[in-house]
Image (tube, rainbow, N blue to C red):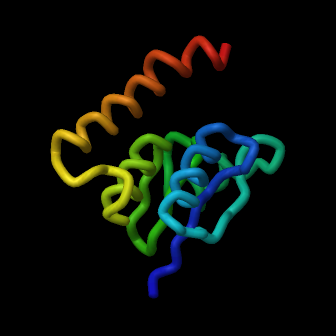
Amino acid sequence: MTEVGLWGRGSSTNVQKVLWTCSLIGLEPKRKIVGGEFGGLGDDAFIALNPNQTIPVWQDGDFVLWESQAIMRHLARQSGLLYGRSATEAAYVDAWLDWFAQVFWPPVRL
């Protein structure tokens, strides 16, 4: 079985979103704590995974994905949960994810 891993520190809101998604689908990923006070984002091994040097990063064997919203969508699709049963239901989920990232979150994080 391929080892699944989530790179990032639990105090990051973007990592927390991915962890929340994991809990909803019953997945407990192995964790690699990096970022913030833990450092590691500038390490060559991490840069090879994500040249943007940001967290979270999802690693499933050779498959590597960064950006919390993309990771959440991937996990929802892969699990068959959370995205509804039709393209229309999935579109509503996408709309809310995009709204959160582009409208709600920017003024909150200031």
**Front-lying residue, 72 or 54:** 72
Point out residue 101 in the picture as x, y percentages from the top left corner: 47, 26
Q: Residue at x 39, y 66 (%)?
A: 63
Q: Residue at x 59, y 40 (%)?
A: 14
Q: Is residue 28 above or below residue 2?
A: above
Quadrant showing the N terminus:
bottom left
Task: Please give left or right for residue 55 compared with residue 102 in the image.
Answer: right
**Front-lying residue, 16 or 47:** 16
Residue projecting furthest to the right: 37
Task: Please give left or right for residue 74 compared with residue 61 in the image.
Answer: left
Q: Residue at x 52, y 53 (%)?
A: 21
Point out residue 11 in the picture as x, y percentages from the top left corner: 75, 43
Q: Please identify the quarter of the rendering in which residue 33 is found.
A: bottom right
Point out residue 99 in the picture as x, y percentages from the top left corner: 40, 23
**Front-lying residue, 54 or 11:** 11
Point out residue 43 in the picture as x, y percentages from the top left corner: 66, 54
Quadrant showing the C terminus:
top right
Residue projecting furthest to the bottom: 1
Q: Is residue 92 above or below residue 55?
A: above
Q: Is residue 76 above or below residue 88?
A: below
Q: Is residue 11 above or below residue 82?
A: above
